[in-house]
Image (tube, coloured by chain):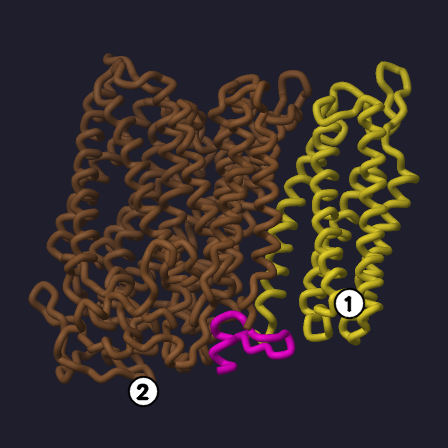
Chain colours: A brown, B yellow
């Protein structure tokens, strides 16, 4: 390992000898670069989804507003949901999976590096495809759940829902192959000694999430395929009008996916928080085993609760009771997690960094969202609350108070590992407080509005209903969130340019990713570590120097100062970073451009089905579909037979 | 070096496996993929079952009394029993192909891979015949709930068989070129997993769609 030095590593350390330039990024199969690409793209979509939400809130600022038409309002709230769920939050968690999982388990790469690149590019093109709909004034307009039969051609004649069925098939395909890759990586690529019960909790929850994704998205794929067949080829799956189809089929298929989906969005976040809290409490995670098993239980029960979204459809008392009970049961493993996080902090030596603050806020806000979730699980109460703003409040406390706060916590925590530089803590704390105040101003009044009877998904309201003041408060809260996010974006950018150099382990954390330089060299580990414990850097593993012994501060090493206290150590990693994989005799998979070609072929094929409707029968663009198909077949063969991938 | 190779996720040959579980990653990935496929087919089958017998208009799959008048069912059970038998036999061919590859029997590998593909093609031929026949009888995707669910479910399965036939033909060509020796057993084994899976799914579809009234 590199020698310890008192000086900070120069900027060179932040750009480890990897090739540069656009082409190297397009053809990269390095999981860390793919992680960064996921992160940057998804953050941009987070801003897009935020703009959509902002417009919705401007429309609702005063009663009887005509800032937006009802149609644009429908498109905006639908695309806000689709963008946030499929293009921002899921890919942001995927960014963390990509960057961190191989580092946490001591692997050089994921199991299938090119498949990993493929899943990114399919997501990339799928996201563009969905957003092209704006330029045709035909963005999806039926909410993210696209309830059929309202979405069949009879009732939604435009292209709007065609974009939905085609775009989400593409995005869903990306998630399925990505999760397949992570399941195999975690099961099969662990460093020697890294038993399942020694894996970092984030890796564990990534595994559970991936299993949920690989199964739930398959159901969703069939649901949207059936809707696509209805819309494009005239089948009758959801045709209740002339064929007698069951109006509940779509809802069952959709929620069979849709409910596990919310666990897909929250489980990785629980993993992140479970890494951040022990580090800044200087205590091991309380009840590691229970955390793992409650995670598995949440994943398992997540499959048995889908019909609690359908209490109002009249399924009957037996079905309603079953789904009410199974939903209440999920609160138990979730509650266990919350107690364990509190137990982790209890009696700890707490350090309130921005990452820690976001994690603590996550516990509080996610609890609020969880409790309103349990309120919905009682069928009689749900009949009152459903389709009101109360549901909107609940989902935003889960997704914003849960997923987003946890993601930001993770970003502050791992940003130094990714870019080799620290985010500014002062800006971070301003970001944190503004976000916390803004989100509560925006989403908390929604509980009251829902109870007063304000329906969700309506583009305006009358002025004598008593909704005005709370709506205005929410819109002001939205402005606060925008302000906070701007500060965050500036922080992300300036830290990348000239942040304080981080060193290997600025937080004094316990897991493997902190034993290597920041940013990690392309080959990750110079030698594959042998793992002897769950917290290799805290339990004094001699092979993994650079850690700080648990519970005491080592005065012999130089430390980074953070808010006046020295918290981490600086190592000179320049020498190690200058060595290429080749010099070390490490074999890495070669770059490949077939993933992007294949992803482009898939998008052309799916896109052609939209554009042949735009151009009309005169040019039915069959050749565009054909070109897409040929590209797919050709790229699949080229991908499979590409030399050099199996040395 | 060897250790590093395995860790980077591309173990040289199947004989040399160095993963956490000792199992090859590609095979494990394929099993996971099959798990996902089960949910895909499961959703389609569930849709079929949910709509079984609820078509408002004919043609109907089985003999049905409509307003006191007997309408003859459209499904040709003898033909499909034959094609089902053929598809099941193709799985035997697949096993023989894998056996030949393991033993390094080049001509046997080519022969049995081609035979598997041939049996698969006969199954597909029966399906094409069936689909065109139904079309002339007035059953299309658009006709009724039975048409929509039947064509999409069996068509989705047929598409999987088609991909499998292309997959097998590619392997047979490679075997002919001498590129599928015993060291490539895993490639054939994975193709076999895929092929057997497609057969197993048909074993579920056949009774549900054709035999149960």
Q: Nearer the viewer, residue A128 or A226?
A: A128
Residue depicted at 45% across the width and 31% down the height: A380
Asked if A26 appears above or below A483 in the picture, the reply is below
Q: Is residue A336 visible?
A: no
Can you see residue A546?
yes
In terms of depth relative to the viewer, which is nearer, B193 or A526?
A526
Q: Which residue is mark 2?
A: A542
Look at the image and say whether residue A480 sits in the magenta stretch: no
| Image quadrant in which you'd find residue A434 | top left
Q: Compare residues A482 and A444 and report the one nearer the observer.
A: A482
Q: Is residue A212 left or right of residue A373?
A: right
Name the image quarter holding the C terminus of chain A: bottom right
On the image, the x and y values in percent for residue B153 come to 71, 38
Count of picture labels: 2
| Prevalent SS, magenta region | loop
Q: Quadrant of residue A58?
A: top left
Q: Which residue is mark 1?
A: B98
Protein chain holding label 2: A
Q: Residue furthest right?
A: B78
The percent coordinates of residue A535 (x first, y second) are 34, 75
Q: What is the magenta range?
A: B1-20
Q: Is residue A20 left or right of residue A507?
A: right
């Amino acid at each position: 390992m590199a020698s310890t030095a008192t000086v900070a590593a120069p900027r060179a350390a932040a750009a480890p000898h990897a090739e540069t330039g656009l082409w190297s990024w397009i053809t990269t199969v390095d999981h860390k670069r793919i992680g960064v690409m996921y992160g940057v793209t998804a953050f941009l979509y987070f801003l897009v989804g935020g703009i959509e939400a902002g417009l919705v809130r401007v429309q609702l600022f005063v009663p009887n507003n005509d800032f937006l038409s009802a149609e644009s309002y429908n498109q905006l709230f639908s695309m806000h949901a689709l963008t946030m769920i499929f293009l921002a939050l899921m890919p942001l968690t995927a960014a963390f999976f990509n960057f961190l999982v191989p580092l946490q388990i001591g692997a050089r790469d994921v199991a299938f590096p090119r498949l990993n690149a493929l899943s990114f590019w399919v997501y990339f093109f799928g996201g563009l495809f969905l957003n092209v709909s704006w330029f045709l004034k035909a963005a999806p307009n039926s909410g993210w759940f696209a309830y059929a039969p309202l979405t069949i051609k009879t009732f939604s004649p435009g292209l709007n829902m065609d974009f939905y069925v085609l775009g989400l098939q593409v995005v869903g395909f990306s998630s399925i192959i990505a999760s397949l890759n992570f399941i195999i990586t975690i099961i099969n690529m662990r460093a020697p000694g890294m038993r399942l019960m020694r894996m970092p909790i984030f890796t564990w929850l990534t595994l559970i999430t991936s299993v949920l994704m690989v199964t739930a998205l398959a159901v969703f794929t069939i649901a949207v395929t059936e809707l696509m067949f209805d819309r494009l080829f005239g089948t009758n799956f959801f045709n209740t009008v002339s064929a007698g189809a069951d109006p509940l089929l779509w809802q069952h298929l959709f929620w069979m996916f849709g409910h596990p989906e919310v666990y897909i969005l929250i489980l990785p976040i629980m993993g992140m928080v479970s890494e951040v809290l022990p580090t800044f409490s200087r205590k091991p995670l309380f009840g590691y085993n229970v955390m793992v098993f409650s995670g598995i239980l949440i994943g398992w029960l997540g499959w048995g609760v889908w019909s609690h979204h359908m209490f109002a459809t009249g399924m009957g008392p037996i079905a309603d009771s079953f789904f009410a009970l199974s939903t209440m049961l999920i609160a138990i493993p979730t509650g266990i997690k919350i107690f364990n996080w509190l137990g982790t902090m209890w009696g700890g030596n707490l350090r309130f960094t921005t990452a820690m603050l976001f994690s603590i806020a996550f516990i509080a806000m996610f609890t609020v969202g969880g409790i309103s979730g349990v309120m919905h699980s009682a069928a009689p109460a749900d009949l009152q609350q459903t389709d009101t703003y109360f549901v909107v409040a609940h989902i935003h406390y889960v997704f914003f108070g849960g997923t987003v706060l946890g993601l930001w916590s993770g970003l502050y925590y791992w940003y130094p590992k990714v870019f080799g530089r620290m985010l500014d803590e002062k800006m971070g704390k301003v970001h944190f407080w503004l976000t916390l105040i803004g989100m509560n101003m925006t989403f908390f009044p929604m509980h009251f509005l829902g109870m007063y009877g304000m329906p969700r998904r309506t583009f305006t309201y009358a002025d004598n209903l008593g909704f005005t003041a709370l709506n205005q408060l929410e819109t002001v809260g939205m402005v606060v969130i925008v302000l906070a996010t701007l500060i965050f974006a500036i922080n992300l950018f300036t830290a990348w340019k000239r942040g304080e150099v981080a060193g290997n382990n600025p937080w004094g954390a316990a897991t493997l990713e902190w034993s290597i330089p920041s940013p990690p060299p392309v080959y990750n580990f110079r030698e594959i570590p042998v793992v002897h414990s769950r917290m290799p850097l805290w339990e004094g593993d001699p092979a993994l120097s650079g850690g700080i012994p648990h519970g005491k501060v080592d005065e012999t090493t130089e430390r980074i100062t953070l808010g006046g206290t020295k918290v981490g150590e600086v190592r000179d990693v320049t020498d190690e970073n200058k060595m290429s994989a080749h010099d070390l005799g490490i074999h890495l998979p070669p770059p490949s451009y077939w993933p992007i070609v294949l992803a482009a072929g898939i998008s052309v094929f799916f896109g052609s089905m939209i554009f042949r409707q735009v151009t009309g029968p005169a040019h039915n663009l069959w050749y565009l579909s054909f070109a897409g198909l040929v590209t797919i077949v050709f790229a699949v063969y080229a991908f499979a037979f590409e030399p050099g991938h199996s040395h | 070096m060897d250790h590093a190779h395995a860790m980077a996720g591309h173990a040289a040959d199947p004989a040399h496996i160095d993963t956490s579980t000792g199992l090859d990653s590609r095979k494990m990935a394929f099993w996971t993929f099959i798990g996902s496929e089960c949910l895909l087919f499961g959703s389609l089958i569930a849709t079929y079952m949910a709509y079984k017998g609820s078509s408002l208009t004919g043609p109907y799959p089985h003999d049905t009394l409509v307003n006191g008048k007997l309408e003859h069912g459209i499904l040709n059970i003898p033909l499909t029993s034959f094609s089902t038998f053929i598809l099941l036999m193709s799985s035997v061919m697949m096993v023989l192909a894998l056996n030949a590859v393991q033993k390094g029997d080049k001509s046997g590998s080519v022969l049995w891979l081609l035979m598997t593909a041939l049996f698969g093609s006969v199954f597909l031929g029966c399906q094409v015949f069936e689909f065109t026949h139904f079309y002339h009888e007035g059953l299309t995707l658009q006709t009724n709930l039975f048409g929509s669910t039947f064509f999409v479910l069996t068509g989705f399965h047929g598409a999987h068989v088609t991909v499998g036939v292309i997959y097998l033909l590619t392997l047979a060509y490679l075997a002919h070129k001498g590129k599928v020796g015993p060291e490539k057993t895993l490639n054939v084994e994975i193709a076999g997993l895929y092929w057997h899976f497609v057969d197993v799914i048909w074993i579920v579809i056949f009774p549900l769609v054709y035999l149960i009234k």
